[in-house]
Image (cartoon, rainbow, N blue to C red):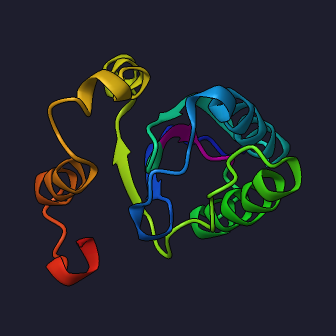
Amino acid sequence: MSTYTQILYQIVFSTKYREHTIRPENEQELFKYIWGVIKNKKCHLYQVNGTQDHIHILTHLHPSIALADLIKDIKISSSLKIKEEKWFPKFKSWQIGYGAFTYSIDAKENLMHYIKNQKEHHKAMSFTEEYKKLLDDFKIEYKPKYLE
């Protein structure tokens, strides 16, 4: 018997202090780099995008990969790459922690569209508002002080 899984994860994390340090001129380089990290972990990336202060990743994990390990690898390696390449001069690091939300495969197209349109979406809603909504929608208890 083989192992079969079909779990979509939407992963969300922000820059340190939610500072607006991700600049449009190099964000595609960052997204390509993250795609490479995910591919090297035998996971499948469906979409990655973000704004000046956070990113969203839609992926399917390989059964041998732990979610926390994947996120740790993405954050550490991308942080080093950002500094090495000087993509975002004011970037300090990623915020500690992350949000990860699971979905059925039926939600894939809508999620891809949602992530692809992050910049437009955030003209009307801040990252904190969006993140609180995700936590509330998934009935995840949180301490508001960690979202400020």
Report which quarter residue 69 is drawn in: bottom right
- The residue closer to the viewer here, 70 or 13, is 13
Relative image position of residue 104 (x, y in whole percent) = 35, 35
Query: Which residue is at 49% across, 70% downward?
Result: 95
Relative image position of residue 77 (x, y in whole percent) = 79, 59
- The residue closer to the viewer here, 49 or 38, is 49
Q: Magenta span has 14?
A: no
- The image quadrant where one finds the C terminus is bottom left
Relative image position of residue 52 (x, y in whole percent) = 46, 43
Q: Is residue 146 left or right of residue 5?
A: left
Q: What range of the chain is rendered magenta?
A: 56-62
> Where 90 sits versus 3, above or below?
below
Q: Overall secondary structure of the magenta stretch?
A: strand
> Where 52 sits versus 113, above or below?
below
Q: Is residue 126 left or right of residue 99?
A: left
- The residue closer to the viewer here, 86 or 74, is 86
Q: Magenta span has 57?
A: yes
Q: Is residue 81 left or right of residue 148?
A: right
Query: Which residue is at 27% across, 50% downward?
Result: 127
- The image quadrant where one finds the N terminus is top right
Furthest residue to the front?
89
Query: Which residue is at 15% across, 31% downward?
Result: 124
> Where 37 sits versus 115, above or below?
below
Relative image position of residue 144 (x, y in whole percent) = 15, 77
Report which quarter residue 107 is drawn in: top left
Q: Is residue 118 left or right of residue 77?
A: left
Give the tally of numbered discs.
Answer: 0
> Where 102 sits versus 33, above or below?
below
Query: Which residue is at 57% across, 29% downward?
Result: 24
